[in-house]
Amino acid sequence: MTQLGLGLDLTTKRTRKREFLDEMGRVVPWSRLIALIEPHYPKGKTGRLPFPIATMLQIHFMQQWFGLSDPAMEEALYDVPLYREFAGLDGGMARLPDESTILRFRHLLETHDLAAQMLALVNEILTEKGLMLKAGSAVDATLIAAPSSTKNGSGTRDPEMQSTQKGSNWYFGMKSHIGVDADSGLVHTVIGTAANVHDITVAHALLHGEETDVYADAGYQGIEKHCEAHASRWHVAMRPGKRRMLDPGDPLDAIYDEIERLKAGIRAKVEHPFRVIKRQFSYAKTRYRGLMKNTAQITTLFALSNLWMARRALRKS
């Protein structure tokens, strides 16, 4: 039994972080994700043997859950016994992965577009268990801030990030566009663009093609003209200005209110994954340069958010 002075027992307290890791450890489909990565993973026929895929994947996911950079993750493995335990590194191993090893694993996932494949695999499992339906989708986008400072090695801002105005404020960075299952709120499609790309431009790419109804906010007004090839019915929120122009005494006003309320109730589910990655996983701004790397990270975050949102149902199944 591990104890400190005065009889303090460190084995009895179930911290929130331990509970979180235990819960995610049970719902992440480790074996199927490892099988997805294995064909691309180095075999280590010469030199030091590589760390097991499971260990590197667990470390990679901890980076996403706790917002850790590669150097910070390396230090955390030395400082936090719980992290070593979760990654299977507490069995007296002679070494721990350094930041270069962690970086190379991330680059391997990026090179082979494995983040998108992991999201697809997670969604395949959720669909098999009846947790994702395909009758309807909701689409939305959120701004992700990028560092605007030029105090870096290149002396420039990220050329793939752009500025855009929202209300009276200007933002520099990128957009994460998502399509979610209208019933469960689970993400099925992720696209990353520069911040100045209009939501309508990529809206059609957020659909999986099997939905009959699509829900969106007022920013998607006019989308029907851009998605004529799709048979889906679009339910787009009325602009606030147009709602204010209606006559309060008109009998149709109450009908419009009910229609907008129903659309808003379904559309609101698209906000749940954004809340998870921004609040639960503390994702606030881009970490890397370039859209490809940041989109890969965001896609991984949404795959993990799907598992988090469906964790109770997954434990029962």
Image (spheres, grey):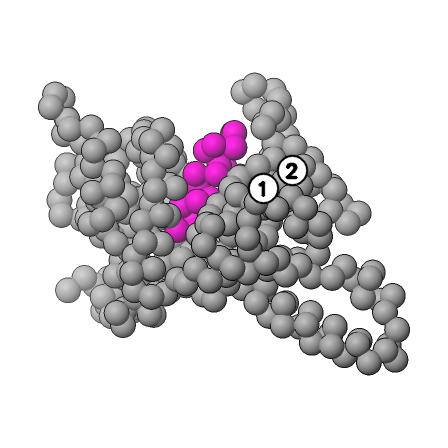
Task: Tell me which residue sits at (22%, 48%) in the image.
Answer: 32
Which residue is disc 2 drawn over? 197
Q: Is residue 80 above or below residue 45?
A: below
Q: Nearer the viewer, mark 1 or mark 2?
A: 1
Task: Tell me which residue sits at (61%, 35%) in the image.
Answer: 194
Q: Is residue 69 above or below residue 261?
A: above
Callout 2 secondary element: loop
Real-space Cα distance between discs 1 and 2?
Answer: 8 Å
Residue at the outermost left position: 45
Residue 202's mark?
1
Q: Is residue 49 above or below residue 248?
A: above
Closer to the chain start, of discs 1 and 2, is: 2
Q: Mark 2: give few (<14), some (14-19) or many (20+) Cα within 10 Å.
A: some
Task: Tell me which residue sits at (62%, 22%) in the image.
Answer: 156
Span colored in magenta: 284-303
| Horizontal side of residue 159 vs 118, given as left or right | right
Q: Are marks 1 and 2 in contact (CB under 8 Å)?
A: yes
| Magenta run includes residue 32 | no
Q: Of the residues shown, which amino acid type is indicated by label 2?
A: Val
Callout 1 secondary element: helix
Q: Observer-nearest residue: 225 or 36? A: 225
| Horizontal side of residue 192 vs 116, given as left or right | right
Q: Is residue 109 visible?
A: yes
Kindly report the secondary structure that dominates the magenta region of the rendered protein.
helix
Q: Of the residues shown, which amino acid type is indicated by label 1?
A: Val
Where on the picture, by quarter, is residue 19? bottom left
Q: Is residue 19 visible?
A: no
The image shows residue 268 at horizontal and vertical percentages of 58, 64
Where on the picture, by quarter, is residue 105? top left
